[in-house]
Amino acid sequence: MTSSKAPSAKSPPKSASEKPAAVAPTVAVAPVAEPPAAPVAPRPNIIVAAPPNMPMRGGGNPMSPRPPMGRPNMPPSFAVRSPGRPGFNEPQSGPPRPPAAKIELKAGDHVVYPTHGVGTVQGIEIIEAAGMEMHMIVVTFEENRMTLRVPVNKVPTAGLRKLFTQKEFEAAIDTLKGRARIKRTMWSRRAQEYEAKINSGDPIQIAEVVRDLQRNAGQPDQSFSERQIYEQALERLAAEYAAIEKIDKLTASDQLVAFAKAS
């Protein structure tokens, strides 16, 4: 008995004309080129227009250097210059000031200090300060119960002076007899001027305050500050007048008021 084997299934032979299946080629994709960036334009300079009546510096160029302040064709004030050249700020040569007159004072003399009135010299004290000796004139004011010490070398500049003579004080009396000159300004400004005259220590200026305020003295419409300034001026003037005439202060005050009313 013959056994038959089934033929194995085999793939048919490939013919020479057959070719393997073609593999799809890989296509390289080129990157998309970005559009070139637009060039950045430079930021424009901000120019502030000048007022129509103001000329621009440098012939219209806003970046030209700024001309110096002040008057034209003049060098700046802070420049260092030598004498004899244009623009040098030379000191004004005015008439020399006369030297202050020396005042000879002794104990018991009556003197006037501008802001305190009439006082009495007690003598000279020597005070040591920083290893130096200072000579001080001691002046007392009985009404204020105050003692003032003024350096001897500062007496002319401090305003300390002797009493007016009778002949010199006549100018203050003539001022009292004159016509009042009241400015048409606010009372606050006039009050400052009156106080400055009182603190000057000049009898003539103090007499002007008494003369101008005498018209309303004792009147109901007189303000408190006006009455206060009037009494201060009259008291300061009467103190010196009493020391000159060697009378009491109340009598001197009555006489000065009579002079002011006579006008």
Image (cartoon, rainbow, N blue to C red):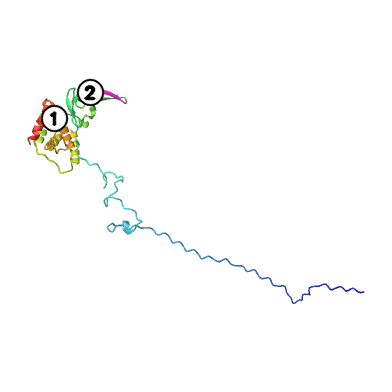
Our reading of the magenta stretch's main secondary structure is: strand
Is 211 rendered above or below residue 4? Answer: above
Q: Residue at x 32, y 57 (%)?
A: 58
Q: Which residue is mark 2?
A: 124
Is 242 rendered above or below residue 67? Answer: above
Q: Which residues are magenta?
A: 123-130
66 or 9: nearer the viewer: 9
Q: Whole-percent x and y of residue 120?
A: 18, 25
Q: Whole-percent x and y of residue 31?
A: 57, 66
Q: Is residue 202 visible?
A: no
Is 78 rendered above or below residue 143? Answer: below
Task: Measure the C-alpha gap from mark 2 to mark 1.
Answer: 27 Å
Q: Secondary structure at mark 2?
A: strand
Q: Residue at x 15, y 30 (%)?
A: 235
Q: Quadrant of the C terminus?
A: top left
Judged by depth in the image, the label closer to the viewer, 2 or 1, is 1
The answer to whether the residues at label 2 and label 1 have Cβ atoms under 8 Å apart is no
Marks 2 and 1, the one that precedes in the sequence: 2
